[in-house]
Image (cartoon, rainbow, N blue to C red):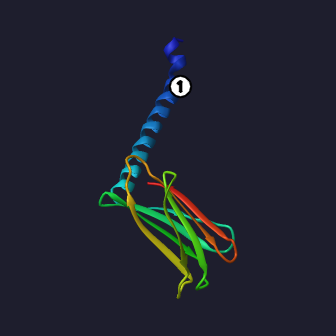
């Protein structure tokens, strides 16, 4: 038995691993490109009580369109909001939930910095103290 015959299963496994790694990298690279070319990246918010939320961002003419929504199913509830991009605060303010859904939606246009942007949003209900937060990369 030759040395090559005894190593062939190892070569087969190594080759299979390399092929899988190349295939995976081919799938990951287009996803980042799509996010930058205008397709939205959406992240479900984590809320500490019963509300639901989502954070969405997409490229828009050299800027990023950011949308943060929280649905509490109760109207006229005040939420204090902060939004940041790569650790730099880009919005601080408040919104009230409105009829008919008992939700608010905050929309922002912010600069699209070079490379991957990490967008984060946090909303705190002024009455209950409930916190909703989400972070995404676009």
* 15 in relation to 5, above or below: below
Residue 16 is situated, as x and y percent measured from the top left of the image, at 48, 33
Which residue lies under the disc numbered 1? 9
Q: Secondary structure at mark 1?
A: helix
Query: Label 1: few (<14), some or many (≥20) within 10 Å?
Result: few
Q: Nearer the viewer, residue 89 or 66?
A: 89
From this viewpoint, which residue is outermost toward the top?
2
Q: Is residue 102 visible?
A: yes
> Which quarter shows the C terminus?
bottom left
Q: Is residue 39 visible?
A: no
> Which quarter shows the N terminus?
top right
What residue sits 44% from the left and 51% below the top? 117
* Side of 117 where 60 appears, left or right: left
Residue 53 is situated, as x and y percent measured from the top left of the image, at 56, 70
Q: Nearer the viewer, residue 86 or 135?
A: 86
From this viewpoint, which residue is outermost toward the bottom?
100
């Amino acid at each position: 038995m030759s040395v090559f015959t005894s190593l062939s299963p190892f070569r087969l496994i190594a080759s299979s691993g390399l092929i899988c790694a190349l295939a995976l990298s081919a799938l990951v690279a287009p996803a980042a490109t799509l996010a930058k070319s205008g397709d939205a990246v959406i992240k479900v918010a984590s809320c500490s009580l019963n509300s639901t939320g989502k954070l969405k961002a997409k490229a828009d003419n050299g800027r990023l369109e950011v949308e943060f929504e929280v649905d509490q199913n109760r109207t006229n509830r005040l939420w204090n909001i902060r939004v940041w991009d790569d650790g730099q605060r880009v919005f601080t303010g408040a919104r009230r939930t409105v009829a008919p859904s008992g939700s608010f939606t905050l929309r922002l246009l912010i600069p699209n910095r070079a490379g991957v942007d990490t967008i984060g949003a946090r909303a705190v209900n002024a009455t209950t103290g409930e916190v909703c937060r989400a972070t995404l990369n676009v």
